Image (cartoon, rainbow, N blue to C red):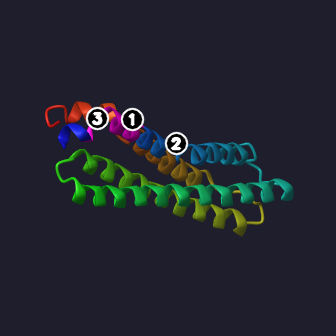
Amino acid sequence: LRSKIWSMDTETQWYERLVSLRTFHDPVKQKFIYIGDLLLNNNRGLDLKRFIHVCEQIALLKDELSIEATVMKDEAKEMQRLKMEYPQAVFLTDIEESAERVSDAASKLHTEIEEVEKELKKGEERSINLVQLNHCQSCFVKLEKLVDEIPTVMDLKLKYQHEY
């Protein structure tokens, strides 16, 4: 059974699965960078048209963050299920814990983005302070780091090379 877990077909499936977990973050990254550029290039406030555009982009970013958090939470649950089915497959815990960390970080960034959105809509100037933007940026950087730490098949093979 152990050799079956890391058979070529199974290894390919795990490779694709782990790569797809990382790529779920791409839309979040693209939206976050785009919105950051829009906000930083308008430090005197946004005209109504740009304000509406930024609000629309923020809504899309929040949707993407929700999707990312849900996908990662679902993946963690699936790893729990697989651990019950294959208790000898200790690498599943690495994937589970990584997915949970990404889900938590995506949820935290979502909450921070909501705060930025409230602040943006609250003021007459249609601007936000840099402290708030910097806080969002640090949450985003942490999320990026956690996505990069999702293990690859090679990471898992190296870590557990003596187990299989």
The quadrant of the picture occupied by the C terminus is top left
Which dot marks residue 77? none
In terms of depth relative to the viewer, which is nearer, 53 or 122?
A: 53
Which dot marks residue 7? 3
- Mark 1 or mark 2, which is nearer the start of the sequence? 1
The type of residue carrying mark 3 is Ser
Residue at image position (42%, 52%) is 102
Check whether the beta carbons of the residues at disc 3 and disc 1 lie within 8 A of each other: no
In terms of depth relative to the viewer, which is nearer, 98 or 88?
A: 88
The nearer-to-camera label among 2 and 1 is 1
Give the residue pinned by disc 1: 12
The type of residue carrying mark 1 is Thr
Q: Tell me if mark 3 has few (under 14), some (14-19) or many (20+) residues whose alpha carbon lies within 10 angstroms of its own.
A: few
Residue at image position (35%, 61%) is 77
Which dot marks residue 23? 2
Q: Which residues are magenta?
A: 5-15
Q: Is residue 109 left or right of residue 36?
A: left
Check whether the beta carbons of the residues at disc 2 and disc 3 lie within 8 A of each other: no
- How far apart are labels 2 and 3 at the CA level? 24 Å
Residue 74 position in % (x across, y down): 42, 60
For label 1, the SS is helix
- How far apart are labels 3 and 1 at the CA level? 9 Å
Q: Is residue 11 left or right of residue 121?
A: left
Q: Is residue 78 left or right of residue 130?
A: left
Would residue 9 be counted in the magenta stretch? yes
Residue at image position (38%, 42%) is 150
The nearer-to-camera label among 2 and 3 is 3
The type of residue carrying mark 2 is Thr
For label 2, the SS is helix
